[in-house]
Amino acid sequence: MELFYHPLSRYSQKVLIALYEKQANFYPRITDLRDPLARKAFQQFYPSGKLPLLKTQEGQLLPESSIIIEYLDTHFQNGTELLPAEAERNLAVRLFDRLIDFDINNPLFQLEKLKYTPEGHEFEIKQLEKQMFAQFQRLDSHLRQNHWVCGDSFTLADCALIPCLSYSFAHLNLLDLDELVRYWQQAQLRGAWMLVLEEVLLVEMEENTGIRSIP
Ligand SMILES: N[C@@H](CCC(=O)N[C@@H](CS)C(=O)NCC(=O)O)C(=O)O
């Protein structure tokens, strides 16, 4: 399998967590869409031009992080079961995955974009921050009854949430949400996330210093 992704893209990080949880081997195809030539080449290969994209062993091209994870979970028996077999739990996991993508991850993109050029956007930023804080409050009370997002075991919904938390804790005032803080602390000790974070920090260091380490 080949994964086209970028270490700093949250939807890519979501799939990377799943690959590490499943202990699945893949060829990393780092694709930087900020580079016009790389973007053009990738769009020729896959016209919708979005990351992440999985090329399966059969050569099928699979977009959409949740679909890729569903594919991994059905094709790899090793490691964590990311989508529970039991129908009711399966539905809950898929629901939380959707809610996290739509109500947390996508608004975070908007917030990042607005904060990049905040002049004239102060009101929009405040509104968005308020809306996101309310989402995190709801999540915090849900986590009172749940060790991971959906019960005792780590699932697709955790793959979706964890990549959103670094930016959220850095830019929203979430430290009073005890259960969310507890969740974020335990997530940072999860091996799969540690592996993802290692790559993120390396890329951030390369971008900040201009020094590219020898692979
Ligand atoms: N729903 C998609 C979202 C993917 C997405 O928005 N990817 C971003 C990077 S995190 C992207 O490729 N943006 C490039 C663009 O839209 O041109 C998924 O879950 O994979």
Image: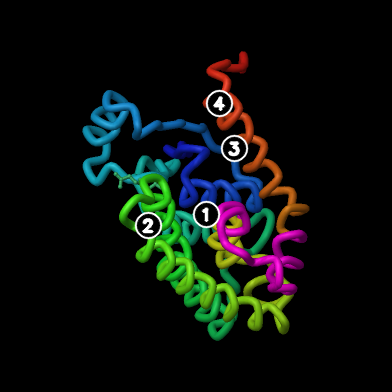
- Of tags 3 and 2, the one toward the viewer is 2
Left or right? Give the position of 43 relative to 108.
left
- Rate crowding at label 3 as few (under 14), some (14 to 19) or many (20 or more) other CA atoms within 10 Å: some
Q: Which numbered tag is attached to residue 110?
A: 2
- Of tags 4 and 1, the one toward the viewer is 4
Q: Distance between the residues labelled 4 and 1?
A: 34 Å
- SS assignment at label 2: helix
* Residue 86 screen position, x and y as percent: 59, 81
Left or right? Give the position of 114 relative to 77.
left
Marks 3 and 1: CB-CB under 8 Å?
A: no
- Of tags 2 and 1, the one toward the viewer is 2
Left or right? Give the position of 36 relative to 138.
left
- SS assignment at label 3: helix
Magenta residues span 166-186
* Residue 58 screen position, x and y as percent: 40, 43
Q: How far apart are marks 2 and 1 (CA)?
A: 29 Å
Residue at the image point whose x is 37% and y is 53% from the top: 114
Residue at the image point whose x is 76% and y is 59% from the top: 185
Magenta residue check for 104 = no
Residue ID for mark 3: 200
Q: Which numbered tag is attached to residue 72?
A: 1
Q: Which numbered tag is attached to residue 208?
A: 4
Q: Which amino acid does label 1 sit on?
A: Leu
